[in-house]
Amino acid sequence: MHYLIELKIGGDLDNKKARSEKEALLEQYCILTNKLGNEDNVKILFATAYNRYGEGQPWTQGRVRQFFAEEELCISRDFWNLVCKSERGYEIVIDEYTKNAHLINEALDKIKNVYLLDA
């Protein structure tokens, strides 16, 4: 399977871009399916790394939903499960983040100390 993914890391999306993002994906879809010779193994997805409304809550970005069908949405848990190729992908990512978040915080503190001395 080939995936064409518009990935938004943040949970609050710029709704004004939904149409142009879908058009860009469709353009790439046409190019890829023409090269492959069929459409059977190509999927378009609009993905987010997390659900700003809370995991398990409905994702209600209305403008995005105007241009992307339900089966084209890959939100939070679904995204991480796809990326990890596991039904437990989301849990794997959350567990690793929990174990290693202190490393990120330490690195950010070092950066702040170097660049924000006057703050």
Image (cartoon, helix red, strand yellow):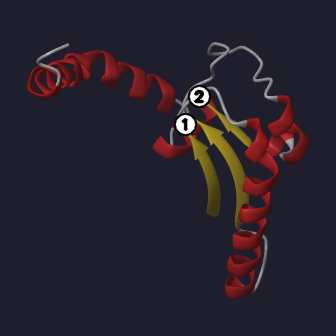
Position of residue 6 relative to residue 36, above or below, is above
Q: Residue at x 87, y 47 (%)?
A: 67
Residue that badge 2 annotates? 77
**Front residue of this view, candidates 112 and 25:** 112
Q: Which mark is residue 113?
A: none
Q: What x and y, as percent, mark residue 48? A: 60, 35
- Hey, which quadrant is residue 93 in on the image? top left
Residue 10 falls left or right of residue 74: left
> Hey, what amino acid is under mark 1?
Asn
> Hey, what amino acid is under mark 2?
Arg
Q: Which mark is residue 81?
A: 1
Q: Residue at x 69, y 71 (%)?
A: 28
Residue at the extreme front:
118
Secondary structure beneath disc 1? helix
Residue 113 falls left or right of residue 39: left
Q: Residues within 10 Å of mark 2 (few under 14, many from 20)?
A: many
